[in-house]
Image (cartoon, grey):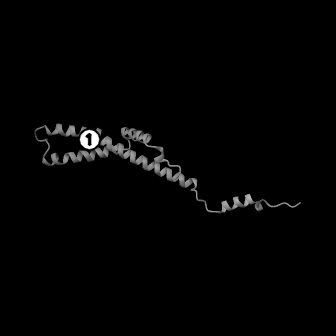
Amino acid sequence: MNVTPFSALPAAQAAISRELKPSTQKDFKTLLEQHTTAYQDARKEAEDAAAGLVSEALILPVFKQLRRSMEETKGPFSPGIAEKAFGPRFDMQLADRIAQSPRLGVKTSIADRLMKRMSTKKVLNVHG
């Protein structure tokens, strides 16, 4: 009885040649790394946008109101010329730093909502 080896069959030859060719598809690890970095970039963008919103809409108005109330006072502790000129800029910097805090729940909540509204195609494009 003459038995032909499996590798001699035409279908097996085609399968072997496909295995030996370099794969044009990306491996799972590479795809996972790309999707992970894409998600992290989108999360960072959402957190930056949320921090800007919190800074401008919530924290800065409180500082402006405090500064206005201090300017109305008279006496030795009233603000001077430099404080009147540079105080608002300092308030903006301080508001931005407070808004960048990782423990600020409002910023995290807004960032989560922004991530939900982003399209999943932009974040996780499965087709490369």
Residue at 32% across / 44% down in the picture?
52
Q: Which residue is mark 1?
A: 60
Residue 3: x percent and y percent?
84, 60
Left or right relative to 80: residue 120: right
> In the image, 22: left or right of 94?
right
Label tally: 1
The image quadrant where one finds the N terminus is bottom right
Q: Is residue 28 above or below residue 103?
A: below
Q: Say what secondary structure mark 1 lies in.
A: helix
Please tell me which residue is depicted at 48% across the width and 46% down the height of the picture: 121
Image quadrant where residue 70 sits: top left
- In this view of the protein, which residue sits in the foreground, 57 or 89? 57
Badge 1 crowding class, 10 Å Cα cut-off, few under 14, some 14 to 19, many 20 or more, is: many
Q: Horizontally, is 56 left or right of 110 in the view?
A: left
Residue 126 percent coordinates (x, y): 53, 49
Disc 1 marks which amino acid?
Leu
- Relative depth, front residue between 70 and 76: 70
Q: Residue at x 29, y 39 (%)?
A: 57
**Furthest residue in direction left, as rendered:** 75
Foreground: 91 or 75? 91
- The x, y position of residue 89, in whole percent, is 22, 48
Quarter-of-image position of residue 113 = top left
**Extreme residue in the front direction:** 10
Please state which of residues 6 and 95 is positioned toward the viewer in this rendering. Answer: 6
Residue 51 pos. (x, y %) = 34, 44
Please indicate whether residue 16 sits to the left or right of residue 43 in the image: right
Q: Residue at x 80, y 61 (%)?
A: 5
